Amino acid sequence: MTNKHLSYAFFTLAILPLLVPAYCDEHVHPDVHAHGSTGPGHDDNSPLGVMGDHAHQAGEAMFSYRYGIMEMNGNLDGSTPASTQDILDAGFMMAPTSMRMEMHMMGAMYAASDSITLMAMLPLKRIEMSPRMPMPNMPNMTMTRKAETSGAGDLKLAGIFPLWAAGDHSRTLRLNAGLSIPTGSIKETGPGMNGGETMRLPYPMQLGSGTFDLLPGLTYIAEKFGGSWGTQVASVIHLGENGEGYSLGNRFQATTWYSRKLSDTLSASARIEGSTWGNIDGQDAEMNPMMSPNARADLRGGERVDILFGLNIFLDTDRWDKWDRLFIDKDNGQLLQAKPQENSMDKETLLSIEIGFPVHQDLDGPQMESDWRLMVGLQVSF
């Protein structure tokens, strides 16, 4: 971990507690607030892209599905565009031109007690890259050769622990402590330079990190007058080297957002997110580092700032079970009205979308430039 990354992490962690009033008589009392106020219902308008932002009461559960897509086009060296010809002139055999990453994320949360909510997430990934390379016997012309990988990524297990809350729970601070388990492949192969041969695909095309990773973070949320704002700091710290002899660079991320309730069923959000990540430590011996900039361990670090906009749509599925019903009495044929049915399970369903665009990128390049990203999700809590 570099001094730059350590400074970034300690700075973000240091300023977060300053947002919390230092009242010694205020503690976490999950039993004093209304049911569902810590879950993903009306009182939680956090953006979809903020993970692990809420906790649940003992016995509550939530299942979620997220679909995410990120589009990358072109390359940057620092913040300066690098053309395909610039990359080939630097001695690389291929120049990546576009890349699309799609993800289906399955998630589950369960509150073992009021003091801990457990979370598990498993991504299913599909990655497609289109590099350009000189044509055989025609070095002044280039051709495109596509490569694709797909499969399960790394499994993430985490716990969310309430650390502090105001007396009315309008302000909360939570600790996120997680572990990433290396279930994703790091040996994906694709077409080589010559027809019929295969080669180890570069680092961005691999599905996992190959290492056990720590996932620490802190989340602060404040709610007032139909609006809420929050901030979260999080990191991915890779432990040791994987089986191929390298370790991905550690990643640190900070985000802050504001969300506004537009109606009983709709809220809108805007947030800004900053990320920094390091170069790879080590090298996969099966990769030719001059095949592509994506195969160079020392060209993987960088930093990026994104702005994102989202919508949350609250779907009260329980109301369908509580509506009055009309039926015909079999004995006398009269039209009667049934009493509203009270469902013992208080279901809440949240449909969300978030789209984001980079406003700053500084990459240890040449490295692929992000264009935009989109996430759509559905969360059902019980």
Image (cartoon, rainbow, N blue to C red):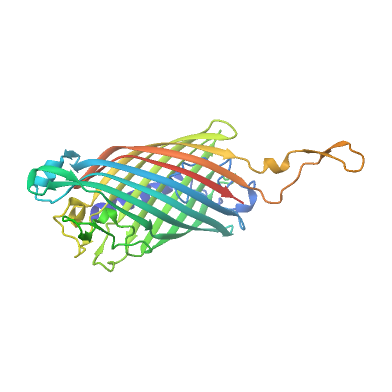
223 shown above or below 196? above
Q: Is residue 44 visible?
A: no
Residue 172 lies left or right of residue 334; in this view the side is: left
Quadrant position of residue 286 = bottom left
337 shown above or below 124? above
Residue 319 lies left or right of residue 258; in this view the side is: right
196 shown above or below 347? below
Image point 29% across, 60% down: which residue? Answer: 188
Residue 294 lies left or right of residue 17; in this view the side is: left
Q: Is residue 299 visible?
A: yes
Residue 353 lies left or right of residue 10; in this view the side is: right
- Where's residue 285, x and y in %? 19, 65
Q: Toward the viewer: 26 or 240?
A: 240
- Where's residue 97, x and y in %? 22, 43
Q: Toward the viewer: 133 or 121?
A: 133
The quadrant of the image that shows the N terminus is bottom left
Image point 22% across, 52% down: which residue? Answer: 300
Residue at the top extreme of this rendering: 262
Residue at the bottom extreme of this rendering: 243
- Where's residue 373, x and y in %? 36, 41
Image point 89% across, 36% down: which residue? Answer: 334
- Where's residue 306, x and y in %? 33, 39
Marks counted in the figure total: 0
